[in-house]
Amino acid sequence: MNQQQHDISLTLTENAAARIRLFMQKNPQARGFKIDLKKYGCSGWGYDVSLPTDIEADELVLEDKGVPLIIPADVLDKIDGTVIDFEKQGINQIFTYKNPQATGECGCGESFTTTETVN
């Protein structure tokens, strides 16, 4: 686990931070909010979030608004600068991601592309 200074920026809105803190209160073993990517959808990448109880050696831990953010080293360049929000859309409540590294999105907004090719 690496908790030193990083050149990466990852930001939570107040709504997102409050929601994550609520999840973490309900899961006291959680070490933080993990933001990962997986091959997903028609554009290539989708967000995969979780509340892990362990932090892997290749994961970085950042903090914003008192929330530990766990990021695997291999996705840092694809999410740098992302702002994570939590929004209510009608009866739905979802995390949304404003990612400056995304060069395109699928029509439904479930996945995105970057300049890097998905392997």
Image (cartoon, helix red, strand yellow):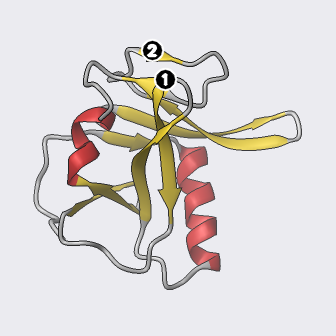
Q: Which residue appears at 43% of the width and 80% of the height?
A: 53
Mark 2 vs 1, N-terminal side: 1
2 or 1: mark nearer the eye: 1
Q: CA distance from mark 2 to mark 1?
A: 7 Å
Q: Is residue 65 visible?
A: no
Q: Residue furthest right?
A: 91
Residue at 45%, 73% (x, y): give it: 52
Q: For this rendering, which residue is in front, 107 or 68?
A: 107
Mark 2–mark 1 CB contact (< 8 Å): yes
x and y percent of residue 51 in the render? 50, 68
Q: Quadrant of residue 71?
A: bottom left
Find residue 110 and report its horizontal and vertical position in percent: 60, 31
Helix, strand or loop status at disc 1: loop
- Image quarter in which the N terminus is found: bottom left
Q: As displayed, is residue 44 above or below residue 16?
A: above
**Picture layout, residue 27 above or below residue 42:** below
- Extreme residue in the front direction: 119
Q: Position of residue 100 (x, y in %)?
A: 35, 21
Residue 70 vs 90, above or below: the answer is below
- List x then y, in percent, for residue 11: 39, 41
Label 2 SS: strand
Q: In the rendering, which numbered label is found on residue 29?
A: none
4 left or right of 34 in image = left
* Residue that numbered label 2 is attached to: 104
Q: Report the amino acid beneath label 2.
A: Gly
Depth check, front residue: 71 or 83: 71
* Residue that numbered label 1 is attached to: 43
Looking at the figure, which quarter contains the C terminus? top left
Q: Residue at x 87, y 33 (%)?
A: 90
